[in-house]
Image (spheres, rainbow, N blue to C red):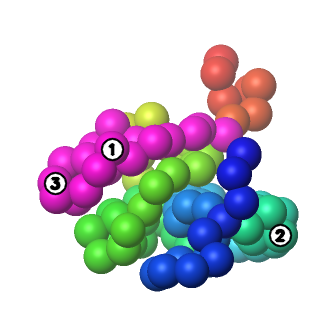
Amino acid sequence: MSEPQKSGQRSYYHRVLLVVNEQAAGEQLKKLLTSKGYMCEIALSWVGACEKIAKELIDLIVCDYRLKEKNGIELISEAPKIKKDSTVIQGLVLCNFSDLN
């Protein structure tokens, strides 16, 4: 992995949106990723995530599979439709084994 940019507009690798049901879990992930040079935002709901996607530059979405409104796969699928003028948004869904049953 290359070093984050030191000059120019940003000094981080990428901007990550963490979409989680629990604030504590989001804060732990944010702490880990920011220590590695990523900029992180946290959303605690589907609606909050959609608002951040529409307003912010997001490179990666990391989200729970089970969200209160819809599941994480649906969020990642709909993200490019929310922010039509953006580059491709990548996504990663986190789940427990029990989520798959």
Q: Residue at x 45, y 35 (%)?
A: 73
Q: Is residue 60 visible?
A: yes
Mark 1 or mark 2: name the one nearer the start of the chain: 2
Residue 58, position as x, y percentages in the image = 43, 62
| Residue denoted by label 3 | 84
Q: Are marks 1 and 3 in contact (CB under 8 Å)?
A: no
Q: Amino acid at mark 2?
A: Ser
Mark on residue 75? none
Q: Which residues are magenta?
A: 75-94
Q: Which residue is mark 1?
A: 88
Of the two numbered discs 2 and 3 in the rendering, the one whose residue sits closer to the viewer: 2
Which element is circle 1 on? loop
Q: Which residue is mark 2?
A: 35
Disc 2 and disc 3: Cα gap in Å? 30 Å
Image quarter in which the C terminus is found: top right
Depicted 31 relative to depicted 97: above or below: below
Residue at 71% of width from left, 60% of height from top?
A: 3
